[in-house]
Amino acid sequence: MEKLLTSILLLLMTVGPACAQQGLKDALGKYFLVGVALNTYQSDGKDPRATQIVRQHFNSIVAENCFKGEALQPEEGKFDFSSADRLIDYARSNHLTVIGHCLVWHSQAPRWMFTDRNGQPVGRKVLISRLRRHVRTVVTHFKGKVHGWDVVNEAIEDDGSFRKSPYYNIIGPEFIDIAFEEAHKADPKVELYYNDYSMSMPGKRAAVCRLVRHLKAKGLRIDAVGFQSHNGLNYPDLHEYETSMDSVAATGVKVMVTELDMNILPNPWNFGGAGIEQNYQYDKVMNPYADGLPDSVSTRVNSRWMDFFRIYYRHRAQISRVTLWGLTDGSSWLNDWPIKGRTNYGLLFDRNYQPKPCVADIIRLFSK
Ligand code: XIL
């Protein structure tokens, strides 16, 4: 009896710490990449507690901001890769696959991109050559270091029409083809993605699938569609979200969940998407959990996370990556968007860098 007890104790001592060390990537990584977006403080390695979570739970990273147009080419022809290169070094020393976000986006684009020296809109030819140069230079710089690129971000409205961005207004819808073509030319081996929010909307779903088929018919490379997945407690409609995964997969590309988080704060405008230009006035009633999250809400949040991860489990054969848009609640953009200065609880790790209860449940779900 005593011998048996000793063996059990010994077993617990060896298996216990191993279980505690089990990360999301160990369970989910069997099926797809498990990523997280890092801000520059984190990717500069200045937050050791963040690095510890990254190493335990993730095998992929993406820059929250420092790969965007305005960061990489602040002045025409003057590229600044300093922060982005530090992220690449960080990834190398922590064995992480890097995803590039993003090459062509109307938001956080270089300020000079769409206008000439006199502040007048540039013509089609000029914008095409600026777009090509940005894509070519950036993709070439990171050749062999980045696994895949969000080539075009948010080009389609929820109703399926093209977003009337300066790229669209000046070039026409071909700006998308041009971006994919140029990216592939610069690095034939790198994966290329189209990325958007509100992918559960039927109009957007249809238009994105049409776009994928169009690119493929033109012989252009596209590997996946990114579902940003800035979710909430009441949106998206889970059934529509799953339908979109099936529809995208049916076009012959992978599904990627690229910017996963969950806004749990009041949403009086019935707000769904992630248009970063949308901003609302701060009001105390809009920030009800500044001093902590009541248990009842916390339970609801954990169960909503499970709803999503059950979907990812069901669709695991279609999915090639799931990336969280941030590491801890404290570092989430959801504290400042769509209203500045709130206390949100949008991620899988809390303000003390502790995993929420659902993390263990997610690991269990994918370990079966
Ligand atoms: C957000 C960042 O998280 C913020 O830090 C920044 O101020 C604005 O952009 N869709 C995207 C991301 O594709 O790049 C956005 O990231 C969130 C919405």
Image (cartoon, helix red, strand yellow):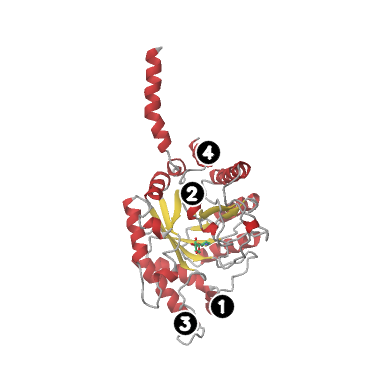
Within 10 Å of the Cα at label 1, are there few (<14), some (14-19), or many (20+) other Cα atoms? few
The residue mark sitting in front, 4 or 2, is 2
Where is residue 5 shown, x and y percent of the image?
Answer: 40, 17
Q: Is label 1 in contact with label 3 (beta carbons under 8 Å)?
A: no
Q: Secondary structure at mark 4?
A: helix
Q: Quadrant of the N terminus?
A: top left
Within 10 Å of the Cα at label 4, are there few (<14), some (14-19), or many (20+) other Cα atoms? some
Q: How far apart are the two marked residues, 4 and 3, measured between alpha carbons?
A: 53 Å
The amino acid type found where label 2 is placed reads: Arg
Q: Is mark 4 within 8 Å of ligand 1?
A: no
Q: How far apart are the two marked residues, 4 and 1, measured between alpha carbons?
A: 47 Å
Q: Secondary structure at mark 1?
A: helix
Where is residue 323 shown, x and y percent of the image?
Answer: 48, 52
The disc placed on residue 169 is 1
Q: Is residue 191 above or below residue 294?
A: below
Q: How far apart are the two marked residues, 1 and 2, measured between alpha carbons?
A: 42 Å
The image quadrant that residue 44 belongs to is bottom left
Residue matched to label 3: 125
Residue at 39% x, 29% y: name it.
Answer: 15
Within 10 Å of the Cα at label 3, are there few (<14), some (14-19), or many (20+) other Cα atoms? few
Foreground residue among 315 and 366:
366
The image quadrant that residue 82 belongs to is bottom left
The amino acid type found where label 3 is placed reads: Lys
Residue matched to label 2: 351
Q: How far apart are the two marked residues, 3 and 2, measured between alpha carbons?
A: 48 Å
Nearer-N-terminus badge (4/2): 2
Nearer-N-terminus badge (4/1): 1
Q: How far apart are the two marked residues, 4 and 2, measured between alpha carbons?
A: 20 Å
